[in-house]
Amino acid sequence: MPRPIQATVHSDALSHNLQRARAAAPDARVWAVVKANAYGHGIERVFDALRAADGFALLDLDEAQRVRDLGWRGPVLLLEGAFEQRDLELCSRLGLWHVVHCDEQIDMLATHKTQVPHRVFLKMNSGMNRLGFKPAPFRAAWNRLAALPQVEEISLMTHFSDADAERGGGDGIAHQVHAFVQATQDLPGERSLCNSAATLRHAQRVLNAAERLSADWVRPGIAVYGSAPDHPAHTSANWGLRPAMTLSSRLIAVQQVEAGDTVGYGSTFTAHTSMRIGVVACGYADGYPRHAPGTLEAGAPVLVSGVRTRLVGRVSMDMLTVDLGPVDAALAQRGSEAASIGAEVVLWGCSASGAVLPVDEVAQAAGTISYELLCAVARRVPFNE
Ligand SMILES: *Cc1c(COP(=O)(O)O)cnc(C)c1O
């Protein structure tokens, strides 16, 4: 038997979540963001479910090629644009739309030889200070692009740093929306502003014609994969999102420990009473976060046989250990046998019983975000087709 860990991608959840994003910005077209191999889910595995999107956004040229190889003829957007001159040849050949965020990329375009002029998304740095032209030089960049025969159409884009929260007294995005609108109001072209958080939290509310916030393209990523972009202010259930990935395994051993016994490397967990410990075939070499806490008070959540319990002790490379107390108690109540070797363990996602453990809760316990956990599922974890 293969080692029992596996990941499962839920196509129905992907379609449903995409639909949720669309419903939040009904007048906008939707880029399904599939960078980082579809947030760890696998571009080929999510493709069919996400075909209902208006386009695919990503940043790796190999991934763009894979989307074309799957037969997608619609829009594909390179979110970071060209990294070097010859990337533009691939853009011409595959018909990729690309972001232009700096003068160097305009220089590359100006010397690019192409039969087909390109569709570009000119990016403004409206406050995040990562990629893009600041509002003042934005127009000069637009004018330069508009004069190039290599450019067919210019769309306008920016990205929010705080769409997931109300920081600094505002709603998180107002100052950036303002900067963007001020600098672009008389420029033609489609707009793209919202990531998942802005799409869910703000698209409806600020659907103010002048600001065209959600128009014309939204760019949801994490929401499509079923995670709340603003957890814990909202949960995935609050947003009506369903987990698109389940990471599951099984118990491969059970240990009876007594008061004073310790569990795992570093003996970081000491039993205060007699208890049963389940040993799960999943460790940090599978992508599970090693820093997830393993204490009775704050242990990261885990489902065993669909019952919620907690990590105890340290996560090791290939295994982690869980408290079977809550599991045995729940099973006894149902008149079932205590958990034993082979019992289903859900690290995040859905159990066979229908119980759901949102990846957001595991991420929060481990002091990180769902994005990191989903992207980190290791190559050695087989995906259930
Ligand atoms: C990753 C990314 C997104 C999607 O962000 P989510 O928070 O996953 O919705 C949108 N726009 C850009 C430019 C990105 O890089």
Image (spheres, rainbow, N blue to C red):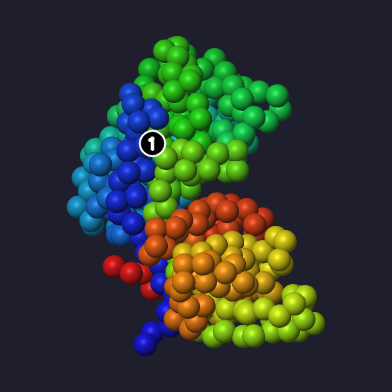
User: Which residue is at the front of the view, 9 or 64?
Assistant: 9
User: Which residue is at the front of the view, 230 or 296?
Assistant: 296
Q: Report the residue at 77% width, 75% height from top.
A: 272
**Image coords of residue 274 (percent x, y):** 71, 80
User: In which quadrant of the rendered image does the N terminus lie?
Assistant: bottom left
Report the amino acid beneath label 1: Ala
**Image coords of residue 61 (percent x, y):** 38, 54
Give the image quarter of residue 373: bottom right
Give the image quarter of residue 322: bottom right
Does 273 appear above or below 351?
A: below
**Image coords of residue 215 (percent x, y):** 39, 24
Q: Report the residue at 44% width, 23% height from top.
A: 204
The number of discs equals 1
Neighbor class of circle 1 (other Cα within 10 Å; few <14, some 14-19, many 20+) is many
**Image coords of residue 120 (percent x, y):** 37, 34
Q: Secondary structure at mark 1?
A: helix
- Residue most toward the right? 260
User: In which quadrant of the rendered image does the C terminus lie?
Assistant: bottom left
Q: Is residue 247 rendered to the left or right of residue 261?
A: left
Does 251 appear above or below 155?
A: below
Q: Report the residue at 66% width, 23% height from top.
A: 170
Does 204 appear above or below 48?
A: above
Q: Report the residue at 39% width, 54% height from top.
A: 244
Tell me if I can see residue 141 in this picture.
no
Tell me if I can see residue 189 in this picture.
yes
Identify the residue position indicated by label 1 in the image.
21
